[in-house]
Amino acid sequence: MKDFVIIGHKALTTGDFSLNDLPGSAGRMDILCRCINSALFLSHGMRRDINVHLVLLGEPDPGKIVRFNGEELRYLNPDERSSGSLIKKALEKDATDYETRSTPGVWIRRGGLEKLIKEFREEKRNIYYLREDGEDIGKINGLAQNAVFVLGDHMGVTDEEEDIISRDSSATLSIGPLSLHSDHCITIILNELDRLEQPQPKKD
Amino acid sequence: MKDFVIIGHKALTTGDFSLNDLPGSAGRMDILCRCINSALFLSHGMRRDINVHLVLLGEPDPGKIVRFNGEELRYLNPDERSSGSLIKKALEKDATDYETRSTPGVWIRRGGLEKLIKEFREEKRNIYYLREDGEDIGKINGLAQNAVFVLGDHMGVTDEEEDIISRDSSATLSIGPLSLHSDHCITIILNELDRLEQPQPKKD
């Protein structure tokens, strides 16, 4: 399993938003919708070995985690409205400290970045922090296949969040020479992992 | 300049569609909207050296080309509705054989794949055709910086279109071991070009 964590600093924490205005009414929920698409879609199917954790920190009830699981996911189409609609349905559930399933493959609970990172640490997962000045993902050796990747949104990552991540992260990575949107970073990370997983041709 | 050509086989050719239903009412226009986003957005700005040509082949008036130019583009936000809205405005113009500007950085005209490829051939541009079984983009040497990349949509590329492209293409490329959506392919191609453009560190 590979896990992506995306922090939505302004993302609304109720389902009270319009699918016709994901950027405005839902606190840049459009960014998180595009991350769902990048992490889960293949041309002819879905990446079944992926979890995406959206950490929603906006008003009015900050600190909710919506998880999309590629293995069990249903009813997701590639367009932003489709993932927006599943997030909205999740946010319409009462969130507790434990996960509640809203639709097949989508869960919601209360929590934030610290809770997630603690769980990954206990599972002894390799946590990679994505930052513009990190080590180029194309140049490092041995990226773990069961990795966890943590990314910010349009506001980046706060100092406090960075402290939480850095304590447990294996490395700080960048996806290349230019700074890109989170969903584009996810596409590049997965392409890199796809190449690493591919059996190498035998040398003569 | 780099150019991306995306063929929208079912994409509507009037502006008579709903931004609330880009996949259904507009013939999978959502795919083309995501390609616009991938080709043009950087984290803090826009890729100014990019043209995106959407070849719209759906009903009721097939054969229109909408061009987005990164250098002059305005009023584009990253969400699908935003690019959908600019495409809709372009399609509301009367299209002729020559380009008409609908909004800053967006043009429309009549035409199809053959016309575009002919123009690129006359400009002596390197044309790359993206196909699952092509040569891995990460393994080829000397990808041209002023390249033209041609991609299909969810329906791929027809035999007839493939003949038109293949006559003038420099190479058939793939973006890695798995088959991905066109917008994800564009992200990976641009990441590859970004790395090639980056000055290499001097060896001691």
Image (tube, coloured by chain):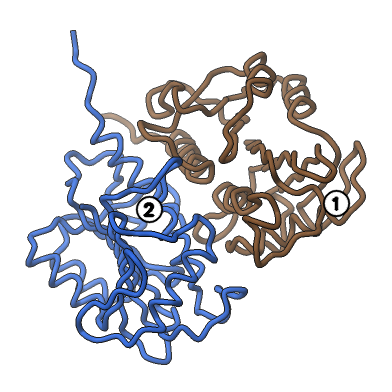
Chain colours: A blue, B brown
Check disc 1 and report its element: helix, strand or loop: strand
- Point out which mark residue B152 bears: none
Q: Foreground: A134 or A18?
A: A18
Residue carrying label 1: B101
The answer as to whether the residues below labels 2 and 1 share one chain is no
Residue carrying label 2: A40
Check disc 2 and report its element: helix, strand or loop: helix
Front: mark 2 or 1: 2
Q: Foreground: A175 or A112?
A: A112
Q: Position of residue B52 (x, y in %)?
A: 67, 43
Q: Total label count?
A: 2
Q: Residue at x 20, y 44 (%)?
A: A143
Q: Foreground: A50 or A115?
A: A50
Q: Position of residue B108 (x, y in %)?
A: 82, 46
Residue farthest to the top?
A204
The residues tagged by marks 2 and 1 sit, at their Cα atoms, a distance apart of 36 Å
Q: Is residue B146 visible?
A: no
Horizontal placement of A192 versus B100: left or right?
Answer: left
The type of residue carrying mark 2 is Leu
Instruction: Output the chain of dot 1.
Output: B
Residues under numbered marks 2 and 1 in contact, where contact means CB atoms less than 8 Å apart: no
The type of residue carrying mark 1 is Arg
Q: Say above or below: A133 vs B115.
A: below
Q: Position of residue A90 (x, y in %)?
A: 38, 77
Q: Residue at x 41, y 25 (%)?
A: B136
Instruction: Output the chain of dot 2.
Output: A
Q: Is residue B26 visible?
A: yes
Q: Residue at x 38, y 32 (%)?
A: B176
Horizontal placement of B196 versus B25: left or right?
Answer: left
Q: Say above or below: B172 vs A96.
A: above
Query: In terms of image quadrants, where is residue B96?
Result: top right
Q: Residue at x 69, y 59 (%)?
A: B84
